[in-house]
Amino acid sequence: MKLLQALFFPPEQPGGVSSMIPYLQDKFNPPHWEMELFSLPKRIRSKGSEPVEFHTFDWHKYEESPIVQKYIQTYRDYLWWTKLRIKRPYDLIHAHHPIAGLAMKEVFPDTPVVQSVHSSYERELILNGRIKENGLEHSFLTSIYRELEYKTDKMITVSRSFVEYLSPFVEHPDNVSVIPNGFDEKRFKPVPHENEVAQLVTVCRLVPAKGLDILLKACAELKSRGLSYVLHIIGDGPIRTELEELAQRLGIYDETIFYGYTLHPEEFMPFFDIFVLPSRAEAFGSVFAEAALCSLALVGTAVGGVAEQIEDGSNGLLVASEDYLGLADALEKVIVDPSFRYELARTGSDHAKSHYSLNRVVHELKKIYLQFH
């Protein structure tokens, strides 16, 4: 069976897709399986020019928005690049971004297209202050889900909570399957270590949706309580300067290290003690599973897929979104009690290995792929 994994970003970009899809190739071996990856290079801009029409809604109602214009142009570019680069037929295409799925079905209408929806672009834009809830762009982007349902042959997403999120925007939410992301255990090598001062780490894009302002306020509270720690922030993004200034104003800049973007944070994540990320929304939250596989204790917010990964008090700690005092309380528990921290880390690692292994994902995907062959 000849498979194409159609990504939007090149696979070296950070995120759940890049931490899973390239590793699938080793699991889909010839002679029964052939797998290739496809994505739109970042240098491709404004190449596509053909008219765009959707079956389930009229996108022209929204075309006054620059964000909608950019989305449509990116779709045109993906169509242009697909027609230019793909010359051979495939038995099935698995798309990992709405633009990829719509473009592939447009170019190859007779080829089965399985569509994975990994996250919500519109929710990220709202949380990051780029668009207004129920505004023009929000309406356009949520309309895309019904178009995907209409055009593609199967929809998959990464958590039960995200199916609930999609439900108002599709005709048949019961037909959406859930396959959480999977991870190759060989990438994660826990390292036994003893840090005299608790080492906190977070890995994410530096945008408002990740709640790092809440994390910095919680860390300031920890300092006011006389607790020692170091906070390592791995990632980059548009609010980095704002976060650095907030750390200075809160008096915790000396305890906080901003690393910027790092390609393989899992290589040194095992040397830290506690992974913390107070996201305001997460479809799945791949970085929590990755941190668990590195044997870090997990502290997160009870949102989306994070709440499905963590059972509070068993394999991690959950707090309410926006509650910096509650976050400080949770962090204090794992800072002052190393035995509790180690137990959370051990249980979290066992849970991640059993629920989020790459082999489990491969098994589930093969079952779906074979339905179309």
Image (tube, rainbow, N blue to C red):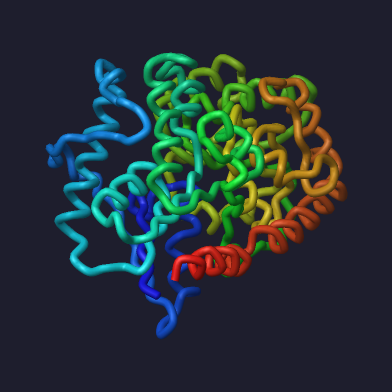
Residue 227 to residue 21: above or below: above
The residue closer to the viewer here, 204 or 103, is 103
Instruction: Look at 50% across and 39% down and name the residue there.
Output: 119
Can residue 184 be seen here? The reply is no
> The C terminus lies in which quarter of the figure?
bottom left
The residue closer to the viewer here, 94 or 37, is 94
Report whether 258 appears left or right of 291.
Answer: left
The residue closer to the viewer here, 344 or 270, is 344
Instruction: Look at 83% across and 36% down and name the residue there.
Output: 333
Residue 86 to residue 316: above or below: below
The residue closer to the viewer here, 186 or 312, is 312
Give percent across and percent down for residue 216: 62, 25
Instruction: Look at 45% across and 66% down and name the residue there.
Output: 372
Can residue 370 be seen here? The reply is yes
Give percent across and percent down for residue 283: 57, 39
Report whether 266 appears left or right of 353.
Answer: left
Give percent across and percent down for residue 125: 44, 25
> The N terminus lies in which quarter of the figure?
bottom left
- Number of numbered callouts drawn: 0
Instruction: Look at 64% across and 52% down and name the residue there.
Output: 289
Residue 131 to residue 207: above or below: above
Residue 246 to residue 124: above or below: above
Give percent across and percent down for residue 340: 86, 47
